[in-house]
Structure formats: structure tokens, C-alpha cells
Image (cartoon, grey):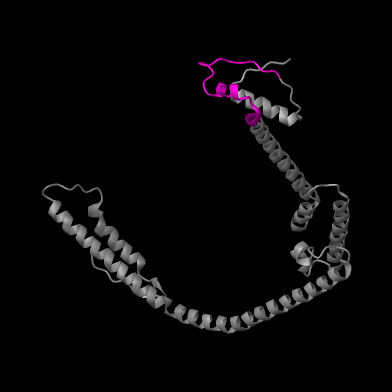
Amino acid sequence: MMFEIVVQDCKIKNIEFIKEILDNSLAAYRGMEVTEASIKQAKKDRAFLKGVVNSLEAKRKEVKNACLAPYYVFESQQKELVEMIDNPIREIELQTRAFEEKERNERMEILKRFFKENSDGINDLVYLEKIFNAKWLNKSFKIEDAFKEIRQIIERVKSDEKTIESLNHPYILQIKDSYYRILNLSAAIQDGDRLIEVAKHLEEQENRHKIKSRIAENMPSETTAIFGNPQSEEIEKLAFTVYVTESQKKALGHYLRENKIKYERI
């Protein structure tokens, strides 16, 4: 199986001739059966055929490098041209970004002046950056529309401030603090209401504690043994009147139940 590959214009010129040689030479291997007697020769044939494949691979790499050599030259030249064009592109991009940043800064200054001129009467804790919307700096967003939105926010804040001042609320300062942090009137009032609930809960706890202390202090000495071991000691009956609030009444009942003191309504 001897043949020579002839390459022309990166193609195998004698491809049909080589295919004919291979077809004739490889016919003997089609449907072959390896036996004990032929295995040695079969291994030699396999090694030979692999050698032919390796030769073809080596030729492929050689031809590839030869055929691609002009391309590699072109690629290098093309990259050089692109780099020449990329330099002004980068410069234009830098200049464009700088110009757009300058425009945004100038628009920001206009918005600051507008806010300052129209924000008289509202608390200093409300400033432009606190209500700022990034879309106001977009060139595609009309500056007049930004003015309109800022004016609406200012009017809302003024109205909210009046509402807060009119509240008869024990935690008005806390409501103001919450409002100027979040600029949400409903949420700020809810924060104040939560403080009322917390204070009420703490007051009830304190009242229950006071009732326990007073009962313990005023209980007759001969009955104090009841709290030690009520099963083994004599139980006495006492009758007296107490004046309590609703929360104190609940606390008293809780205390009696906790100490297993039997009581009944008169």
C-alpha cells in the first residue's frame, strides 16, 4: 500500500487515485476473522494501518500550516488595523462619558437650586438627596417633569407636617423622628401608636407587681403560713374589700391563682 499525496491549492490533487489504492488494499480486511493462526499477522497489519493513519495526520498538519500561513499574515495585519481604529474609539468613549457626566452634574445643580427656591417652610431634615430619583438626571427625562415631581413631593411633605402638628399624640416627637427618616406619614403614625401599646403593656406589668407587693405586705401574720404547706396546715377564712382598676383586678386574680388561694365572690 504505497502512495504519495500530491497537494495543490490546499487540496489533495490525486484523491481519487489514492482512494482506489486504499479500496483495493483494504478489501482483504473486510469481514476478516482473527484466529489463533492469524492473530500475529493481524496485529502486524493493525500496526501498519495505524502507521498509515499517522502519516496522513502528519501530512494534514503540514498542509494546514502551509495553507494557513497567508491567513496568519492577514490576521496579524488586520489586528494592527483594528488597533489603529480602536484608539480613537476609546478616546471618543472617554470624552463622551466625561461630557455626559458634566451634563448630569449641571442638571443636578439646576435641581438643587430649584429645590432650595421651592422648599421654604419644610424641615431642614428633608433635602433633595433624600427625595432624589435617578431618572431626573436622564437627558431623555424633561427637566420640567422633574421640577413637577419635586414640587409635588414638597407639597406632600408640607401637608404631612401640618397633619403631624395637629395630632394630639403623646409621642409626637417620636412620630416626627420616624417621619423624617422615611417620609411616610402612615408608617410614622403607626410607629407612634406602637409606642402607646408598649407603654400600656409596661404600665400593666408595673401595676401587677405593685399589687403583689401590697398583698404580701398587708397579709395578716397568722395566715402567712398558708403559703408554706396548705395541705398540712389549717386554712382560715378572711373577708375584706379592695378597690382596684380593671388591670389591678386581673393582677390580683392572677396572684391568688398562682398561690393556690381559694376565693369566692360575696
Instruction: Report whether 172 appears left or right of 87.
Output: right
For the N terminus, the image quarter is: bottom left
The quadrant holding residue 244 is: top right
Residue 23 location, quadrant: bottom left
Assess whether residue 234 is covered by the magenta stretch: yes
Q: How many numbered marks are there? A: 0
Residue 96 lies, with reference to residue 140, above or below; the image says below
Closest to the observer: 13 or 187?
187
Residue 249, placed above or below residue 5: above
Which quadrant would residue 112 be assigned to in this image? Answer: bottom right
| Residue at point 14%, 47% (across, down) | 35
- State whether residue 69 is above or below residue 223: below
Across and down, in percent, residue 48 comes to: 20, 62
Is 45 left or right of 156, judged from the image as shown? left
Q: Give, as a single range, the part of the protein colored magenta.
A: 215-239
Left of 138 or right of it: where is 119?
right
Residue situated in front as seen by the camera: 68 or 112: 112
Expressed as whole percent of the image width and height from the top left, the position of residue 191 reads 74, 47
Residue 35 lies in the magenta stretch: no
Above or below — where is 26 with respect to 104? above
